[in-house]
Amino acid sequence: MAELATIARPYAEALYQVASQQDTKAWQEQLSALALVAQDSALRQFAEDPKVSPDQVYQVMASAANLQLLPGVQNFVREVIANGRLAALPAMVQQFHELANTAAGVADAQIFSAYPIEPAQLADVVATLEKRFGRKLQAHVELEPGLIGGIRVVVGDEVLDTSVKARLERMKVALTA
């Protein structure tokens, strides 16, 4: 993965420079949809076929994303395809999101919960987490029933685990030591 991240960095930085002069939010939405499309192994296999032109790959991606792409996004995707970097597109988009979030003073927070979180509860949790991590957070909730109860939060490389599963693991280690 480090290789993809290395390939993706200059693309993401150039992309952010262009997008920051326009509507970064719209670019993020369109690029996220295209990154999901680019993760499809059948599409990447199609793109690698020497009989398929870069324009055909672009047309398939654009129709699969089902969006009216901004001209700058169109140009970017065409360049990525022409340079044979389709496999790195998700990494490029991830790094682009990180650059945009850093510029906006926001961080992504992945919240894993054993049960669904109501919007009012989520707002309280996010407010508490923002105080804990000292920055504005953009929360994404994912259900993980194996946690038994509580939540696990990942913000960048920081993890806050208040789940029942983690507590049980800590008790197990303490009792067997």
Image: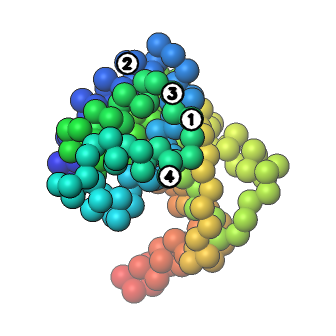
Label 4 sits on a secondary structure element that is helix
Please name the residue that numbered disc 4 is placed on.
64
Is residue 92 something that shows in the picture?
no
The answer for how far apart the CA atoms under marks 3 and 1 are is 7 Å
Task: Give the camera-side residue of 14 and 112.
Answer: 14
Instruction: Kindly state the secondary structure of the residue where label 3 is placed.
Output: loop
Specify few, some or many for label 2: CA neighbours under 10 Å numbering under 14, 14-19, or 20 or more: some
Work out how far the residue at label 2 is from the one at label 3, CA to CA, in angstroms: 15 Å
Q: Is residue 21 above or below residue 155?
A: above
Residue 27 coordinates in the image, percent (x, y): 51, 30
Q: Residue at x 20, y 38 (%)?
A: 83
How far apart marks 4 and 1 lie (CA) works out to 11 Å
* Residue designated by label 1: 68
Bin the neighbour count of mark 1 within 10 Å (Cα to Cα): few under 14, some 14-19, many 20 and up. few
Q: Are marks 3 and 1 in contact (CB under 8 Å)?
A: no
Q: Position of residue 64 (x, y in %)?
A: 50, 52
Do the numbered discs 2 and 1 sit on residues whose CB atoms are within 8 Å?
Answer: no
Mark toward the viewer: 2 or 3: 3
In this orientation, which residue lies closer to the viewer: 152 or 54?
54
Which quadrant of the rendered structure holds the N terminus?
bottom left
Residue bearing mark 3? 70
Number of labels in the image equals 4
Residues tagged 2 and 3 counted as in contact (Cβ below 8 A): no
Name the outermost residue toward the top: 21
Which residue in the structure is indicated by mark 2?
A: 17
Q: Residue at x 79, y 51 (%)?
A: 119
Residue 84 location (% of width, % of height): 21, 44
Please, is residue 99 above or below residue 168 in the view?
above
Q: Quadrant of the C terminus?
A: bottom left
Q: Amino acid at mark 2?
A: Gln
The first of marks 3 and 4 along the sequence is: 4
Amino acid type of disc 3? Leu
